[in-house]
Image: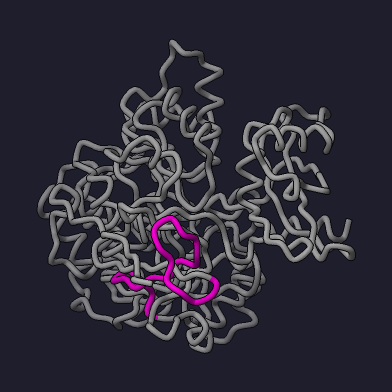
Amino acid sequence: MTQHTAKPLPPHPHGDAFPDVAEVWDLVCRRADATPDAPLVVDQDRRRITFGQYRAAAERVAAGLAARGVRAGDVVSWQLPSRIDAMLLTAALSRLGAVQNPLVPMLREPDVEFICRQAGTRLLIVPGEFRGYGHGAMADAISGRLDGLDVLRTDAGLPEGDPAGLPPVRGPEVRWLFYTSGTTSEPKGARHLDSGLLAAARTFCAALEPRPEDVVAALAPMAHVGGVLHILAALLSGTSLVVSDTFDPAETARLLSEEKVTLGGSGVPFIRAFLQVQRAAGPDARFFPHAKCWLVGGASRTPSFHAQVRDELGGVGLVSGYGLTECPFLSWGRLDDDDHAHATADGRPGPGTEVRVIRSDGGAAGPGEPGELRVKARQLMVGYVDSALDADAFDEAGYFRTGDLAVLDEQGRVTITGRIKDVIIRNMENISAREVEDALDGCPGLADAAVVAMPDEATGERVCAVAVAETAGRVPALADVCEHLLSCGLNKRKLPEQLEFVEELPRNAMGKVMKNVLRERFTAH
């Protein structure tokens, strides 16, 4: 069968003012020279900095870090909340040519120690405490077990110095180590180049075409690869960001409303919360009159949810992107896509990205035919920190195996349909967990739900739905849930045989449900 490939997004001039830039610090300087007084970011405390102030402050922090002994090539791990300081640190480490390893704040001692040990971290930068957790005490404990690991607490702010004595910018080719969340195994570290991350940010810019007058809600953790890419996209396009170190639905909605956000987000859990805030305020109080769209990525959604967002929060509704730590912004939708694409698809690949879909029999899938999505791209990692993982990660043609099931349509749009490992095999028949989850959306009495495979002596595996009740203390019966699913057209063979309830679904930093946690909990139960 002839290989069906996606037509990538063309570059867009408004989204990338510096197409020749290949290094992050060069981009910081070019943007500061071009629009020094334009706003870059506002945080939850209404602190603001411009692009020019960003470069100047980052250089002072770079000098302070250099005075502590940080040199080009040193691995610096940092675990900071989504504040302006985290943005300054990112630029400062780029100025020094250090290898930076951002760690999302939700990671705890075992994962942080594993990562620092494997990455060869020289300096670990943390707050003393954040949201009731002692990051400083954790870092001190880890440094006591790892020779050569220094700890810097940011309680009094980042160190600063005179940038006049900074050496020229230099450093290794690989300057970024991003680790997967480790929800199914030990964390895996993806090695990235500056040019690769810039290629990912250019995918966002090519699709969304952000302009200097746009305001982007950058609510993903700053230490997540998506958080860093929001910074780079702002530097490329001249748009401004709104960040917050914590999420409070009412307060965060007020912040985004005050700042006249145009590209809202970031992710399904945030947007569901904004819907509730909007509904509580009533239709006459429009929180987001300037919204062009609402950005989601890495989470399933339904056409009904898209319609709610479009009609109640505004803009074209949902616009989805898709990526992984290894290839972070593989595809993005566009504002001018049709309504069906907004509701169901995950966009087209970015410039310099090649994708293919491979059936389970190894053949190339045609349009609309499902299979594993595989990719070659400028933004693709250059390999894992543990190089032993590379052999299984790439196929014989050099394409990265994403592990995600997808289809490509005739226009080359990618639609993610689930994970290869997120299939329930009952009586030797495959059941897509995502298909059942989509049918559960809108089920009376359920506010949220996930579907996992549970071991079963008779059938091998059974379908287990884990849900959050819409009203505490009032949970629907399994029979009622199954009746709803049948009314939605779900095949009887795919109905859940087990229904469990939790106060909230466990999610990682990007809002993805950690199904291994649910599986372990209810297998033991």
The answer to if 368 sits in the magenta stretch is yes
Where residue 49 sits in the image (x, y, percent)? 27, 44
Quick one: 239 or 92, which is closer to the camera? 239
503 with respect to 488 (left or right): right
Highlighted range, magenta: 360-382
Where residue 241 sits in the image (x, y, percent)? 32, 43
167 with respect to 514 (left or right): left
Where residue 4 sits in the image (x, y, percent)? 34, 65
Q: Residue at x 63, y 31 (%)?
A: 442
Q: Residue furthest left?
A: 34
Q: Is residue 274 visible?
A: yes
Q: Residue furthest top?
A: 284
Q: Main secondary structure of the magenta part?
A: loop
Q: How many numbered tags mark residues here? A: 0
Quick one: 124 or 6, which is closer to the camera? 6
Q: Residue at x 60, y 42 (%)?
A: 438
For residue 199, above or below residue 414:
below
Quick one: 239 or 379, which is closer to the camera? 379
Where residue 143 sits in the image (x, y, percent)? 59, 77
Q: How is the image coloured?
A: one colour
Q: Residue at x 22, y 50 (%)?
A: 53
Image quadrant where one finds the C terminus:
bottom right
The answer to if 387 sits in the magenta stretch is no
Image quadrant where one finds the N terminus:
bottom left
485 with respect to 315 (left or right): right
Q: Is residue 259 visible?
A: no
